[in-house]
Amino acid sequence: MPMFLILAVLVITIILAALVTLRPSLTLARGGKILAFLAFFIFPVFAGLLGLENHMERAKQTSFCLTCHIMGQYGQSLYVDDASYIPAAHFQNGRIPRDQACYTCHTDYSIFGGFKSKFRGLHHIYAQYVTGPQQPVKLYHPYNNRECLHCHEGSRSFEQGAIHTVDPQTMADIKSNKLSCMTSGCHDTIHNVKQLEHVKYWKPVQ
Amino acid sequence: MMLTQADPINKKLRVSGGLISLGLLVQALSLLWNHPLSFIAFVSVGALLVAGGIGLYLFTLVNIPAVRPQDSLGDKAKGQTQQI
């Protein structure tokens, strides 16, 4: 829902709540009782849910993730001009939505995955402002192939890839997450932020 | 000065409305602030104030003394009114 509509709902709710607050005698009449119920219960809950939904959607934005200084280098790595950098190749070729690049690869594609991501985000805030972020930044858990397979499973390049089909066990191990996609020698160049000073960068055509 | 039944209810309504209005204001401001802390402000300040206000309002609703039919005439005579 557009921001201005959410803000309009919030402002209308504030006005109604303020009206009943300043003139509680309105509730003497039947209409006033209904107005109070709307202003003090239905509208605030509705407005709160709209706001929550907006915050959840906004937290998926690449620009939102990059508001934290520590994420700056990870954002920069999306522009590395080297196809072996997996996030950069995905970002630059539109394999993931650019405006939700971080979220697309770092959410859990499981039931309640979105909420788990949100809780991880809250932990990021705790780490950023209370305990201090760990250096270097590490994932909480090893990256799960499930997040790659969410898009790649069933695609020709994945299902018929020479290495993937070298033997039936390899494919089974990839799909069951026993063999990581990022195994050394496979897709093992990820953000690689330590090397960012020594690489060329892609400049998108405006 | 005579204290009517409506006075404490009005007071609770005012507090409840104040909490809700303030909470909604915080929520609205948090939506205009594009920063990870804005979500914290939305939940821990805005939503908490709104929830407190709604809770107080509902508590007030369920705690209105019941008016028995035979009392209502007498109440009117005393200037007591029931609100909400």
Image (cartoon, grey):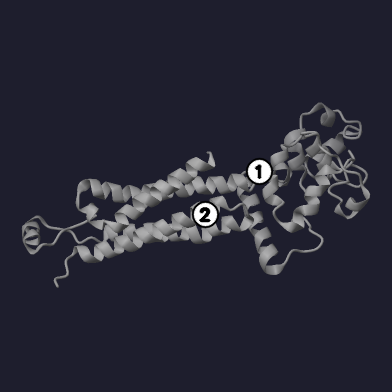
**Where the C terminus of chain B falls, by quadrant?**
bottom left
Disc 2 crowd rating (10 Å Cα; few below 14, some 14-19, many 20+) is: some
Q: Which residue is drawn at 44% across and 60% down?
A: B49
How far across and down, in percent of the image, does residue B31 sit? Answer: 54, 50
How far across and down, in percent of the image, does residue A80 sit? Answer: 86, 43
Q: Which residue is drawn at 51% across and 48% down?
A: A51
- Residue A186 bears which disc, if any? none
Name the image quarter holding residue A83.
Answer: top right
Q: Nearer the viewer, mark 2 or mark 1?
A: 2
Image: A127 above or below A10: below
- Residue A110 bears which disc, if any? 1
Residue type indicated by callout 2:
Leu
Q: Mark 2 points at which residue?
A: B29
Label 2 – label 1 distance at C-alpha: 33 Å
Task: Classify residue A124 as left or right of residue B68.
Answer: right
**Where the N terminus of chain B falls, by quadrant?**
bottom left
Q: Element at badge 1?
A: loop
Count of labels shown? 2
Q: Which chain carries label 2?
A: B
Q: Work out whether residue A200 or residue A155 is closer to the camera in this orientation and state it.
A: A200
Disc 1 crowd rating (10 Å Cα; few below 14, some 14-19, many 20+) is: few
